[in-house]
Image (tube, rainbow, N blue to C red):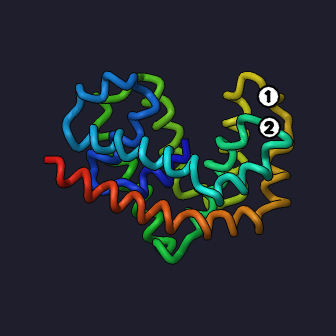
């Protein structure tokens, strides 16, 4: 999951919770939560569906797919968080720091909704400030390695980070062609969710 993008494309505290919760619940469980959290779960899925169908993401996947095949999408997601974290048209450095701190605060205030596995991950995320440090090469290297470690059918030493560095300029272009469209889509989705109250 590209944590920074999903947290940034949340329009309320409840949506932040739902966006992070989505990967930890079954589909029929989403109705067990308050409406704003349900909206976050819906937003997460809308973002994923839009992302998977966007031409710029298809181009970005071509960079990784020779090396990691079907896992290319996961590495593109991580890459997009790097470029989002360095997108100063959306936030300056202080703004991204404030965003990161707000997300950790909201998640910690809503831990009762999350399983233990998420709580353990959140402790690490906050300690190492993942959201803010996606902007750093070492931060994205850590995230890439994390994906490799979790992937069942990939060698943990595949040089995915090196591929990222070699193709950073092209991946930046993919981000530039993609994220404004995603942001517009998320805003439209949120407007629709607000009508359904």
Q: Residue at x 67, y 49 (%)?
A: 76
Q: Earlier in the sequence, mark 1 or mark 2?
A: 2
Image location of residue 118, percent across then percent down? 45, 30
Q: How many marks?
A: 2
42 lies above or below 154: below
Q: Secondary structure at mark 2?
A: helix
Instruction: Tell me which residue sits at (35%, 41%) in the image.
Output: 42
Residue 171 position, x and y percent, is: 72, 62
Q: Is residue 3 left or right of residue 43?
A: right
Splitting the image into 4 quarters, where does residue 14 fall?
top left
Q: Residue furthest left?
A: 197
Left or right, residue 133 beside residue 60: left
Is 60 situated left or right of 16 in this image? right
Q: Which element type, helix, strand or loop, lies under badge 1? A: loop
User: With respect to residue 28, does 186 lie above or below?
Assistant: below
- Residue beneath label 1, please? 154
Q: Residue at x 67, y 36 (%)?
A: 146
| Label 1, residues with CA under 10 Å away: few <14, some 14-19, many ≥20 | some
Residue 179 versus residue 93: which sits nearer the camera? Answer: 179
Q: Are marks 1 and 2 in contact (CB under 8 Å)?
A: yes
Measured from the top left, where is residue 73 in percent x and y? 66, 43
Give the alpha-carbon distance from disc 1 to disc 2, as whole Å. 7 Å
Q: Can you identify the residue that label 2 sits on? A: 68
Q: Residue at 59% across / 68% down in the picture?
A: 86
């Amino acid at each position: 999951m590209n944590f920074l993008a999903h947290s940034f494309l949340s329009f309320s505290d409840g949506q932040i919770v739902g966006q992070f919760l989505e990967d930890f619940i079954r589909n029929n469980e989403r109705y067990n939560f308050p409406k704003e959290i349900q909206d976050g779960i819906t937003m997460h899925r809308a973002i994923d569906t839009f992302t998977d169908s966007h031409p710029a993401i298809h181009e970005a996947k071509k960079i990784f797919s020779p090396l990691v095949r079907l896992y290319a999408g996961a590495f593109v997601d991580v890459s997009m968080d790097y470029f989002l974290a360095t997108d100063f048209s959306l936030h300056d450095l202080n703004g991204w720091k404030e965003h990161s701190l707000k997300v950790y605060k909201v998640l910690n205030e809503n831990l009762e909704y999350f399983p233990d596995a998420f709580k353990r991950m959140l402790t690490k995320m906050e300690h190492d400030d993942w959201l803010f440090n996606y902007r750093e090469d070492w931060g994205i290297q850590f995230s890439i390695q994390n994906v490799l470690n979790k992937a069942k059918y990939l060698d943990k030493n595949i040089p995915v980070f090196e591929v990222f560095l070699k193709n950073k300029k092209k991946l930046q272009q993919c981000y530039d062609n993609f994220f404004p469209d995603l942001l517009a889509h998320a805003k439209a989705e949120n407007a629709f969710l607000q009508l359904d109250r």
